[in-house]
Image: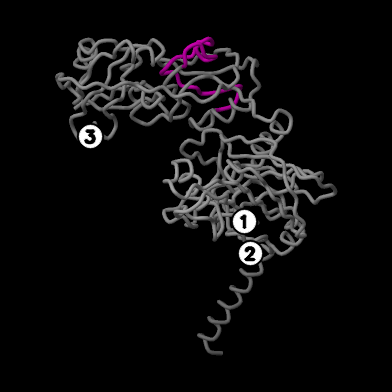
Amino acid sequence: MNIRFIIRLSFLFLFFISFAHAFAHGVALPDFTVLAEKHGNTVVNISAIREVSLNQNRTPSVEEKQMQEFFKRFGIPGFPGLPFRGQPQEKRMSATGSGFIIETNGYIITNAHVVAQADTFIVKLADKREFKAKLLGIDSRTDIALLKIDASNLPKVVVGDPEKVKVGEWVAAIGSPFGLENTMTVGVVSAKGRALPQENFVPFIQTDVAINPGNSGGPLFNTRGEVIGINSQIYSRTGGYMGLSFAIPIDVAINVAEQLKLNGRVIRGWLGIAIQDITKELSESFGMKGVNGALIAGVNKNSPAERGGLQPGDVILKFNNKNIMTSSDLPKFVGVTKPNVIVPIKIARKGKKIELKVKIGEMPDDKKVAVVEKQKQFDVNRIGLVLKEISGKEKKALEGRNGLLVLEVKGKEISAKIRPGDIILALNNSLVSTVYSFNRELNKVPTGKTIALLLYRNGNTLFVPVKIK
């Protein structure tokens, strides 16, 4: 027999054996047809409508322009454009999104941004029935909203466990992209526990499932037909899908929905601190060996954290016996803790590990403090900063704290970290009050050493590492 024929036959045999082994072990692509048939009827289409009076003899207001941009982003083709000259008239501005039924008597979850600022909500079921919905509550921090329609015996979703989701696992989304109802797209989980800017309370599930305007608020299913998340955001430079989609874990959403149902709002635990990740440079400046934990960059006056003994520069390692690996871990644990509960918090402070008992408070409304900036001529210090002591008015805005206002930043490297208008509150955990004392301590630092500056910027505090050259 020809030796080449035998070799080819052997390779062919091995190929079939490998294929059979992969198929037997579930490596083959999943079949989503059963999921679509069985669970597609739990997904709804939501139209959010707002009646707007357009005076066509005037320039649209900032709010109207923002609303128009909102509906451009999340709407369907045919939304109203800017008004032309003529008589005032009423126009209906409509955005479309998705949602899904969580209780058979008509409770529906969707994204807050789908229904925000609208007056009327129309829910269309998979069987084409339409209902006018009542908005029970919105939570902007997690982008969750709860609607209620007057219906019964509706199909509802099966809730899964996001903790069991694995990276690489197949998932599917059902929604109404661009108003095209009950559209299914599939992909895999790309990452878990993803923290996004200004989204501290949600450990997002990242996928490569195609999500477009209109998909927002729809469910993310695993292959067993369980909902593991709510499709909420995409990363895009064009406004369309680019392979990066983010879903809110379903356990976070259900917790919020239950509170909206009971209270009409979400009650969260609160410490009253500003936190950030620990970089290698900051770890070096604090004399730490690792980068795990949440670094406290600021403590609010009269907050639960201050009353419990937490200080700027402390690193939270455990909260209520849960390990804190990165700063994004902490807000979700604190947020689900009930106010007035006393919890143990393990911290690292100046090389020592300490356990404190802190009574959790209730999160207040958002508040930002504006800081007055003034320009004068001052000397440039060792790291290229022009500083001045803050005024009484600025000190009042900082709740009585001292600090040094950054007037100018000289040098490309330092300007990447510190900006004019920043206020320096501390140098290596030592509070600062005068330019003279700050520069004196700065001049004592050996060349090549990294220092940590605590800054106040736009209502927030953060540590910035600076290497002395």
Q: Which residues are magenta?
A: 300-323
Q: Quadrant of the N terminus?
A: bottom right
Could you tell me which secondary element the residue under label 1 belongs to? strand
Q: Residue at x 38, y 12 (%)?
A: 396
Quick one: label 2 or label 1, which is nearer the N terminus? 2
Q: CA gap, disc 3 to disc 1?
A: 44 Å
Residue identified by numbered label 1: 170
Instruction: Specify the amino acid type for callout 1.
Output: Trp
Residue that badge 3 annotates: 413
- Asked whether disc 3 touches disc 1, contact meaning CB atoms under 8 Å apart, the reply is no
Is-magenta flag for residue 3? no
Residues under numbered marks 2 and 1 in contact, where contact means CB atoms less than 8 Å apart: yes
Structural crowding at the residue carrying mark 3, measured as other residues with C-alpha within 10 Å and reported as few (<14), some (14–19) or many (≥20):
few
Q: Name the residue type under label 2.
A: Leu
Which dot marks residue 109?
none
Query: In terms of secondary structure, where does tag 2 sit?
Result: loop
Instruction: Please tell me which of labels 3 and 2 falls first in the chain.
Output: 2
The quadrant holding residue 464 is: top left
Q: Which residue is mark 2?
A: 29
Element class at badge 3 = helix
Q: Nearer the viewer, mark 3 or mark 1?
A: 3
Snapshot quadrant of residue 40:
bottom right
